[in-house]
Image (tube, rainbow, N blue to C red):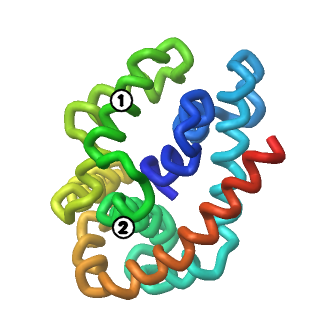
Amino acid sequence: MNFLAHIYLSFDDPQLTLGNFIADSIRGRDYGHLPEMIQNGILLHRSIDTFTDTHPIPRKSSRRLHSRYSHYSRVIVDIYYDHFLARNWAKYHHEPLEDYVERFYALLRENRTHLPGGVQRLMPHMIRENWLANYANLDGISRVLEGMNRRTGYKSGMQHAVEDLSSHYESFGGEFESFFQELIIFSRQKIETL
């Protein structure tokens, strides 16, 4: 799952949300200096990633892209799934997406000292370009995929993946819906054990 899903799956707990958001920037067990609930968010993120990587539905989505994007197909599916979450936001959360993401950006600003350097550098771009709200439209997804392609040294071809999303929109959307229901249940259960 990508940024928006990880944030959502923290179920409005601010410290859990921070940990879940920064987890990809934390190597190994280098998080003992952080508050306990941020540490739990990191562990939750890792559990969500493992659940997603081993689940047959995201794997099915990924296989549809594999011949064109190889090992980048899983990253692309994570971005697609964030698109469907943003696009169908009202189904999952009572707060409008714009308000939700503004509240999240405020949380980042207030907790800057807990953010790893890479996240601190990424944050202004994310906020200025409003990545999270822009996941809801194909232009926003296209910009994300172009940025990802740049970060791979233009090797991945990800800038074309918005075409694949458009071509198989209903299939990817249906797979997201089925999978995300299971992921919500998994995440709630995982939080209880942290």
Task: Work out whether 156 lies above or below 57.
Answer: above
Q: Is residue 25 visible?
A: no
Mark 1 to mark 2: distance in Å?
21 Å
Determine the secondary structure under disc 1.
helix
Provide residue 176's location: percent of width, then percent of height.
Answer: 47, 74
Question: Which residue of the protein is positioned furthest toward the front in this rendering?
Answer: 94
Q: Residue at x 50, y 68 (%)?
A: 74
Q: Is residue 13 visible?
A: yes
Determine the secondary structure under disc 2.
helix
Q: Quadrant of the C terminus?
A: top right
* Kind of residue at disc 2: Phe
Q: Is residue 167 left or right of residue 25?
A: left
Q: Residue at label 2? A: 84
Q: Residue at label 1? A: 105
Provide residue 14's location: percent of width, then percent of height.
Answer: 55, 30
* Kind of residue at disc 1: Tyr
